[in-house]
Image (cartoon, rainbow, N blue to C red):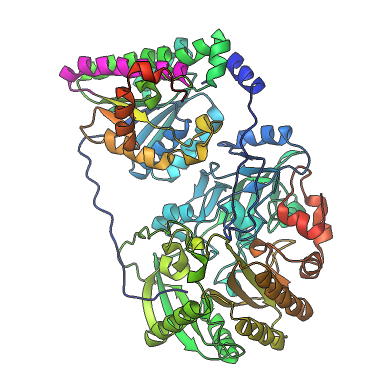
Amino acid sequence: MMTITAHPTTTRPAYTPARAMKKIVILGATSGIALEVQRQLAHQGRELLLVARSPQRLAEIQADLAIRGARQVLTCSADLASIQQHAGIFEFVQRTFADFDTVLLAYGSMHDQKDSETSVDVLLEQLTVNFVSATAILTLFASDLERRRTGCLAAITSVAGDRGRRSNYVYGSAKGALSLFLQGLRSRLHPAGVRVITIKPGPVQTPMTDHLANSARFADPEQVARDIVHALERRSPDVLYTPKIWRYIMGAVQQIPENIFKRLSF
Amino acid sequence: MSGQSAAKLRKQSAVPPPTERILSWGRYPKIAHQRVHKPAWNDQVPEIFNAAAPGALLPYGLGRSYGDSCLNAGRELIDCRRLNRILDFDASTGMIRCESGVSLSDIIDVFLPKGWFLPVTPGTRFVTVGGAIANDVHGKNHHCAGTFGAHVRQIGLHRSNDGLVICSSRENPDMLGATIGGLGLTGVIAWADIQLKPVAGPWIDAESIPFQSLNAFLDLSRESNDRFEYTVAWLDCFAGKNPRGIFFRGNHSPSHGAEFHPKRGPKLPFALPAWMLNRYSVKAFNTVYYKIHAASKGVAVVPYDSFFYPLDSIRQWNLLYGRQGFLQYQCVIPDTNLEAFEELLDRIARSGMGSFLGVLKQFGSAPAAGMLSFPRPGLTIALDFAMRGERTLRLMQSLDEIVQKSGGALYPAKDARMSSALFESSFPHWRSFVPYIDPKMSSSFWRRVTGAQ
């Protein structure tokens, strides 16, 4: 069943980044979206420093990314949720990867909303992981880039942070707070020429969302990663919605008057 | 990044997950699964085993098996697609170690630019390494390279009762033989070592030759098998005992040529209405297809993907057969029993139900790599039949009788309906495979053909 024709040779468009991105630090390298982003960066021959908890898992992706074309893959095993470990992480990055130019914060934690309503432990854990620890580690990296007057800080928040919803407001408020933090940070770092990108994915098919209803219809992480890599290597936008349709959906959702919104159960 | 207490709480309040519907490539049978696990890391597989009841699980890859061998009706699947990391590569020998969810497509993308290609490839690149091993798939080079399993040097196998078992020709060779072609029933493959083969580039020196009888096909096949690494034929199955067809043969081209990146083809967006495929439209397609190829016969340098994967250029082509899905019939009939093969072709032609995807290949005589491997010396033919209820099943039963009488076999990866008796005669030694089945594993296919619970 093969068609023997002339040579349908196609060539990929030459790769032309608008911004020098060579050395990328990934915080939360074993998260579902980060895994896809790293693959694409490896394919482009970038240098990566991966931070995540499990040394075993880090070793697996380190091997994979090196084979797929990454120029260099360093790993740092640490728990980003534990703020006490941040200084050690930052010190490791400065020692081994000093001239990094891009930081992508990709970790997060989502629990069943009902658990956060009944357990203060779960509530605080959600806020700590998604907001407190994220702002703490970003502050370390921000000051370094500001001093060097270069680079890009990107963090994955969520469309869930654009409006507090009955079904997911704890996760949403932590991510929304992180988006606000990034907004201020962007303004602070702008004079230094450091870019800050707020990445707001819609629901994506990753281990974090497998337990949700309809997860089979969520966005493909490969497509989301493509959007993220594209944004990292360009000068705009400041706020990335991915897939793009979420910019319009959330634009509409934000217009609904509170008096009506409070009656909606989604 | 979740804390201990929160993780515990989440487990306690786990809601029963929704009923998940996963279809095989033929989109028949349509069944539901109780749950689909999606481990992202090999270290999560033992937890899944521990929580499962006996016979509850079956690994699942890209779902390119046509029937029910990749399904586990009413029970659970382990979707291995996130286990997709390449763990090691030796650039001097071409040996790779990869996890079971790595697709053959991925291997080509990563290693062809480095000068290495798959030792054996089936007609689609969208299968996982785990699936290629579990079905011991074959390709156009079976006559000289054997099956995919023949190039698997070592497997790390998750077993529910004894952890990670290393299987190679030295360690647990029986378990290696059971896992190759073992339909996913021996455990979950954590990783496998596969010997790639060196190639000059992405190009194939290909030749297509029209033929007008079964004997002409056999002559071409005999003559070509020494000189060509890849041989296969397309067959117009409306022509009966003396079918016309196009014989394709090829070798990896020594020319380096230009760099080549396959295009992403169009995608069939939804299932076509069933009436669009009928004996007239298919006959017309076959005639046009034959005429085009007969007119353009000869030698050409073609990219590897149009030579190996012509159907991959239309994504979701399985939707062509309508909402009811389709059945593929792939059997092998011993070389010594050509009359049976002619009878089979005659029966298909007279039914008027054949399709345009008739593929014919003469298998080589390499010993089987696995205990339940399908390929064996003889002629193999693969045909699609749109599912039209009883009459489709009746036709296939009548083909079964011919296959069984001839001493042939049916391919489990393509099957959704063969009888226990035909399975027994196709794989007379299947009972010696049973001790290697992992106690937590089972499949719809296995229960159907063996009566296991």
Please determine whether, in this image, residue A42 is positioned above or below residue A122: below
Q: In this view, does B107 lie to the left or right of B178?
A: left
Q: How many labels does the image show?
A: 0
Residue A149 image point, x, y percent: 19, 20
The part of the chain drawn in magenta is A168-195
Q: Is residue B262 left or right of residue B274?
A: left
In the picture, residue A245 is in which quadrant? top left
Q: Does the magenta stretch include residue A191?
A: yes
Q: Which residue is drawn at 35% across and 16% down?
A: A258
Residue B4, relative to residue B411: is it above or below? above
Q: Nearer the viewer, residue B293 or B432?
A: B293
Main SS, magenta region, reads helix
**Residue B158 appears in view:** yes
- Residue B113: image location, x then y, percent: 39, 56
Residue A71 visible at all: no
Q: Which of B102 and A266 is in front in this view?
A: A266
Q: Measured from the top left, where is residue B181 in percent x and y?
A: 69, 59
